[in-house]
Image (cartoon, helix red, strand yellow):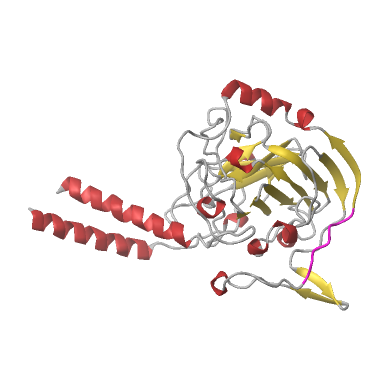
Amino acid sequence: MARHTLFSLLMAMSAATVALAQLSTFPATPLVSEHFPTPSDAPYHADPGNLARGNQTGYNICNSTTEGPTSLCQTAYVNDLGDFCLWGPAQPNSTIADTEGEVVAWCTVPGHGTRIMPEGTITGAQLVKTPDYWMITGLIQQSNIDIASNDTGGELDPGGQDLRGNPIGGLLYSTAFNTTEYQINNWVNFMGSNQFCIKICNPSGSNPEGYCQHTLDRIGSFYNCPSKYTQPTSSMQPGEFEICDSDNMQIPGVYVENGQTLSYSQPPESLGGITTIPYTPTIPSSSSCQTTSSAALFASATASASATGSGGSSASRTSSASGAGNTSTSGAERTIGGAGALVLGIVFSTLLLS
């Protein structure tokens, strides 16, 4: 019996290895090219699943039944300075590097079927509006949305290492460029070091793929979202909230030197850290700024938090991430983890049936 069980176990592990090798890495249609125009068009899972990095861990159909501190909603919104979402882990004390494929939506107000940021999470923010993009940058108590307090973070986007997005299957909607909530295919969200940037690009704008490009994740938010909050020498203090019109930023990675327009590409992560970047971003000029208070912006969120409780689920997960700045991982660890889970599942099934 023992010999039979061992043989079955080895056969199961071999079959699992073959099955994993046959899984495709990339979807037939990249997430950034999937079109679900309104929230009501969203499927339960925007990602097709059965791919090498594992399946989508949350869901995209979100409503009052999914809203709350344990929500796994992966549909986010950016409607205004007082009504927007950021991506954060589902378990406390997690790092972006370890959870980028599984993060969930944390919103400033109820009504989207997501988790709701506890009172005091956003301590300062600026929304800048251009015809081509809207961008919100600011200060955040990131541990309030389950990001480890010392995490330098990384980038979330609809691309990812396998074109499935980080989070896998994450969707985003906005009223910024439409009278009703409409899908934004191109967006970026930097989280870490108690700062954030979320930028959404107008689907009908001049260059949504350029302004919201996501190939410079390792050089951080200032190069992708230049603002007074993200600049390295920022002296911005908590308590400042404003909405401004703005000139367009330069396309990330594009710069002018001696009258010549050049472009920068970050080196592969396998070559180590980035030591030299040949240009410094310029913060675009802004105008018509209007200031407000956090109490006025987040009154409904405060009421909801008082009624339902704040923070994430009671389970905890401690992890460590390496690298400086807003660094994201390649996702290889999650691919291996998914493979291990599949192998173990088959192994246990074999043992139970032996």
Residue at the far top in the pictured view:
307
Q: Considering only vertical position in the picture, is 33 above or below 60?
A: below
Q: Main structural element of the magenta stretch: helix, strand or loop?
A: loop
Work out whether residue 211 can be spotted.
Answer: no
Q: Considering only vertical position in the picture, is 49 above or below 118?
A: below
In x, y percent, where is residue 157? 62, 54
In the image, 246: left or right of 39? right
| Range covered by the magenta-colored residues | 279-285
In the image, 36: left or right of 94? right
Q: Considering only vertical position in the picture, is 273 above or below 31?
A: below
Q: Does the magenta stretch include residue 70?
A: no
In the image, 338: left or right of 84? left
**Of 179 and 193, the residue lying toward us:** 193
In x, y percent, where is residue 303? 67, 23
Q: Is residue 284 magenta?
A: yes
In x, y percent, where is residue 272? 57, 71
Seen at 87% across and 78% down, the residue is 258
Seen at 79% across and 43% down, the residue is 237
Residue 251's image quarter?
Answer: bottom right
Residue at the far left in the pictured view:
1
**Of 348 and 319, the residue lying toward us:** 319
**Of 316 and 198, the residue lying toward us:** 316
Image mark count? 0
Seen at 82% across and 48% down, the residue is 129
In x, y percent, where is residue 171? 60, 46
**Of 38 and 283, the residue lying toward us:** 283
Work out whether residue 4 can be spotted.
Answer: yes
